[in-house]
Amino acid sequence: MKQLMCAAIQFRISLGYIDANLDVVTAALKRVASQGAQLAVLPEMWSCGYDYRNLTALAKETPRVLEDLQKECSTLGLVTVGSLPELVDGTIYNTAYVVDKGDIVGSYRKLHLFSTMHEDQFLGSGQRSLTVDTSVGKLGVAICYDLRFPELFRKLALEGAEIICIPAEWPKPRQEHWKTLLRARAIENQIFIIAANCCGIQGKLDFTGLSQLVSPLGNVLQIGAEEDIELVAKFDFAEMESYRKKIDILHDRRADIYGTP
């Protein structure tokens, strides 16, 4: 049964400054790779943050950002997941890209837009979920506010995801929700979770950090504080298999009653 070294990269996103953020990420990827990490998750909109006034121009730079990220992942032999602004036919999406050692093997547009902060006025919403086979296993992807919708996570688990990767920009006032929901999603689906949040202040928002790596039993293997940090932990898939055999949640569910496929 495989074991996997995984990382969450947490940092203060410089609003609108792509090259500064890219430099931070490049250095962080090198550090986690030197610790043996094979999979790394980056925050939401990590290249620029939610710089709505300039988002169209910033989104036009995403192909360049991705190209640089692909080169770095190829050199380091890393699988990386993180979200960036994607411009398609005049619409901007918050899109998480799965880069497998240099190749883009999947992308996921954020399904649930946070209307409280007017995301729906600036961004298009995705129309499909994502599970994808990679060199480190089958990954599911969700982004930030998606965490509040357990149906999505159950779908990813039923599709065979072994790890769910969550890029986020989760604010400090709701940090207890963040901590609780990450453990809940791991426990109820008996799955590993890597959640990479940003930290620090952007405009009027204070982001909590508290990135986490969580086991299928809900054990928090690593958690950040409120500063730039890389968290690395080993995922032991024998633990997941053993626990699922002991308490077979996915088998015992009643899809005939509550309609989840």
Image (tube, grey):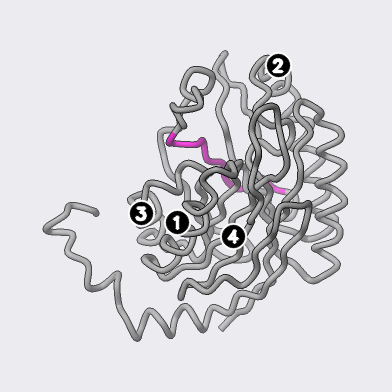
Gap in Å between the C-alphas at discs 2 and 1? 32 Å
Q: What's the amino acid at mark 4?
A: Ile
For the C terminus, which image quadrant?
Answer: bottom left
**Circle 2: element type:** helix
Q: What's the amino acid at mark 2?
A: Asn
Q: Position of residue 24 (x, y in %)?
A: 84, 45
Tag 2 near tag 4, CB within 8 Å? no
Q: What's the amino acid at mark 3?
A: Lys
Select label 2 or label 1 by which is in front: 1
Query: Residue 181: which numbered mark, if any?
Result: 1
Q: Is residue 60 above or below residue 152?
A: above
Tag 1 near tag 3, CB within 8 Å? no
Most foreground residue, 242 or 48: 48
Q: Earlier in the sequence, mark 2 or mark 3?
A: 2
Q: Residues within 10 Å of mark 1 (few under 14, many from 20)?
A: some
Q: Earlier in the sequence, mark 1 or mark 4?
A: 1
Q: Residues within 10 Å of mark 4 (few under 14, many from 20)?
A: many
Tag 2 near tag 3, CB within 8 Å? no
Q: Residues within 10 Å of mark 3 (few under 14, many from 20)?
A: some
Select label 1 or label 4 by which is in front: 1
Query: Residue 194: which numbered mark, if any?
Result: 4
Query: Residue 54: which numbered mark, if any?
Result: 2
Magenta span main SS: strand
- Residue ID for mark 3: 155
For the N terminus, which image quadrant?
Answer: bottom right
Magenta residues span: 103-112
Dividing the picture into quarters, in which one does residue 231 lie?
A: bottom right
Residue depicted at x 52% and y 23%: 123
Select label 3 or label 4 by which is in front: 4
Q: Is residue 242 left or right of residue 251?
A: right
